[in-house]
């Protein structure tokens, strides 16, 4: 965009446009609050008061500062960050939407609203009018038809113990924490203290559907998981992990059972769905779709304000505060604001593809990929290396590429990690200094190779032709089994089965026996 085009698009500040030269915490808060309580707007950072483009870098420092302001503000509207280039000068665009429920306040408690070019504070009757107009009671605090006396005694005692309440103060504490009101259980209370919350709350359960292929439209298994919320969560996690199973990898004398998806990630994804779903949508349960390549968790209701798919890691806004508080007391959910971090960081640590988040307006979908560009044997080999020293997140992926025979350069590591030159240099030097990589050459001509003693399993360092030759050589010495080849190569059972079948078809191996007794010999070796 040229300066003239920018001037035409944003001639001056108004009800919906604010110019700011930098990221001033207090001033930015004021405008975010004012836009959230009015009709929304855009804040253009890097613009002088007179509309001149002075520029503001769209870098991690600026982005982090804006996210921190949003965290400091109480209940802002949904927001997103973008970069606008005006004749090669960067302008940071902060789009703030009108808050649909409740109202927004600054960290100091001031309520403002946008009027023309001013962020006006509200007092007295004007403030009361906005509060009355925008106030919203959380649905989880709505009383149900269940009396407190209807609560399951064992569930109530368990809840009391988790929170550390005195026995003679239970009813008082239930009211204070939002689980009861006027002698009746609230929605949150019924979810935790009723044997079957669905009797009063509709489809307040979990439904698991299993599909045999990724493109199947018909499921072959349907399970309904009911009961109090903590039980639903634990049963659903256990069932998914049973369905997924693990990848068994044998490296030398060690066996590794690698989870298809880490249990903590499964638990947190389902905890988020149960804690943040809209229980007002009582005709739809939380649904879990298990397919060969992924697990998807579908939670009724869109993301609560100000959370969006783009800022989901930075912004927090629990829809059902009393519910999530209880799940944390039970040790079934992470602390506030850490759930998404734990999911993404754990998948990265395990070298698995990251979770995917979608919000289609009426439900939030979290998809956990099962397949990854990093093979199970490579994940197991990295665990072997971790016995020699500490590896950081990016180190693992760089070593995988080195194990595949690549001569690594700074440019190649930048490409692998999607990072800058300095960060790539730091990774390479750290792995060199801890004897994971060997440096050959210097300065711009330096290349880095896997240290000689760290030779990975044959399945990582040999290509298809070399692997076939290795297996044929083994079979020439003695009859071999699938397990023998797995131990020698680090490949998994299905990969070995495919290799052996190919060699039999090519008449390089002879097959005898059945099932676990199946053995293979080189075609030129006598079976007598």
Image (cartoon, rainbow, N blue to C red):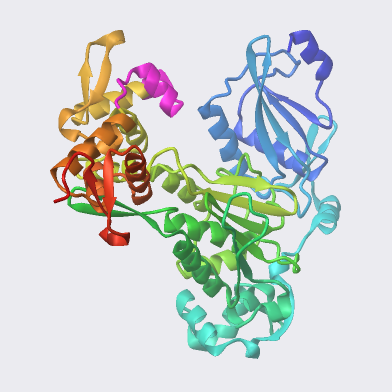
Depth order, front residue of 142/231:
231
Please provide the residue range marked out in magenta: 405-423
Quarter of the rendering containing residue 66:
top right
Whether residue 482 sits left or right of residue 287 in the image: it is left
Q: Which residue is drawn at 18% across and 49% down?
A: 479
Query: Vertical placement of 63 versus 279: above or below?
Result: above
Whether residue 525 sits left or right of residue 144 in the image: it is left
Q: Where is residue 233 in the image (x, y as percent from the top left)?
A: 53, 68
Q: Position of residue 228 (x, y in %)?
A: 58, 77
Q: Which residue is drawn at 31% across and 39% down?
A: 507
Q: Where is residue 199 in the image (x, y as percent from the top left)?
A: 70, 81
Is residue 11 visible in the rendered structure shown here?
no
Q: Where is residue 196 in the image (x, y as percent from the top left)?
A: 63, 81
Query: Where does the N terminus fall, quadrant-wise?
Result: top right
Q: Which residue is drawn at 21% across and 15% down?
A: 440
Query: Vertical placement of 153 versus 399: above or below?
Result: below
Depth order, front residue of 203/452:
452
Q: Which residue is drawn at 51% across and 87% down?
A: 154
Depth order, front residue of 314/470:
470
Whether residue 117 sits left or right of residue 142 in the image: it is right
Tell me if residue 387 is in the magenta stretch.
no
């Amino acid at each position: 965009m040229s300066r003239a085009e920018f001037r035409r698009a944003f001639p001056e500040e108004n009800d919906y446009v604010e110019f700011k030269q930098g990221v001033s915490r207090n001033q930015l808060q004021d405008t975010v609050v004012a836009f959230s309580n009015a009709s929304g707007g855009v804040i253009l950072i890097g613009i002088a008061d007179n509309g001149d483009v002075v520029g503001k870098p769209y870098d991690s420092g600026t982005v982090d500062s804006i996210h921190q302001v949003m965290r400091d503000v109480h209940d802002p509207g949904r927001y997103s960050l973008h970069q606008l280039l005006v004749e090669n000068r960067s302008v940071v665009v902060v789009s703030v939407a009108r808050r649909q429920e409740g109202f927004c306040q600054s960290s100091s408690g001031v309520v403002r609203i946008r009027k023309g070019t001013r962020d006006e504070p509200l007092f007295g009757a004007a403030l009361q009018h906005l509060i009355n107009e925008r106030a919203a009671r959380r649905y989880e605090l709505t009383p149900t038809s269940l009396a407190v006396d209807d609560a399951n005694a064992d569930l109530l005692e368990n809840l009391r113990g988790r929170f550390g309440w005195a026995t003679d103060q239970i009813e008082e504490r239930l009211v204070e924490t939002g689980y009861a009101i006027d002698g009746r259980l609230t929605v949150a209370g019924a979810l935790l203290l009723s044997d079957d919350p669905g009797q009063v709350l509709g489809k307040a359960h979990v439904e698991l559907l299993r599909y045999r292929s990724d493109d199947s439209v018909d499921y072959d298994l349907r399970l309904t998981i009911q009961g109090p919320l903590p039980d639903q969560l634990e049963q659903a996690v256990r069932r998914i992990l049973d369905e997924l199973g693990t990848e068994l990898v044998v490296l030398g004398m060690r066996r590794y059972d690698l989870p298809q998806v880490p249990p903590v990630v499964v638990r947190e994804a389902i905890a988020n769905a149960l804690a943040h779903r809209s229980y007002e949508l009582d005709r739809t349960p939380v649904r879990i779709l298990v397919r060969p390549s992924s697990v998807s968790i579908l939670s009724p209701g869109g993301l609560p304000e100000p959370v969006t798919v783009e800022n989901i890691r930075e912004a927090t806004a629990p829809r059902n505060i009393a519910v999530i508080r209880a799940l944390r007391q039970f040790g079934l959910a992470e602390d506030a604001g850490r759930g998404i971090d734990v999911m993404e960081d754990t998948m990265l640590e395990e070298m698995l593809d990251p979770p995917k988040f979608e919000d289609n307006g009426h439900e939030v979908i979290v998809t956990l990929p099962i397949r990854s560009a990093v093979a199970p044997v490579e994940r197991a080999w990295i665990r072997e290396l971790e016995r020699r020293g500490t590896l950081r997140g990016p180190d693992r992926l760089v070593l995988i590429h080195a194990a595949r025979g690549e001569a690594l350069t700074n440019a190649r590591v930048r490409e692998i990690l999607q990072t800058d030159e300095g960060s790539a240099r730091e990774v390479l030097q750290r792995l060199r200094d801890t004897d994971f990589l060997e440096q050959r050459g210097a300065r711009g001509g330096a290349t880095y190779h896997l240290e000689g003693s760290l030779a990975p399993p044959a399945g990582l360092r040999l290509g298809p032709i070399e692997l076939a030759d290795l297996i044929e050589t083994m079979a020439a010495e003695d009859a071999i089994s699938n397990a023998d080849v797995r131990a020698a190569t680090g490949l998994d059972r299905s990969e070995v089965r495919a290799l052996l079948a190919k060699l039999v078809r090519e008449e390089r191996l002879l097959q005898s026996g059945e099932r676990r007794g199946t053995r293979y010999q080189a075609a030129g070796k006598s079976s007598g």
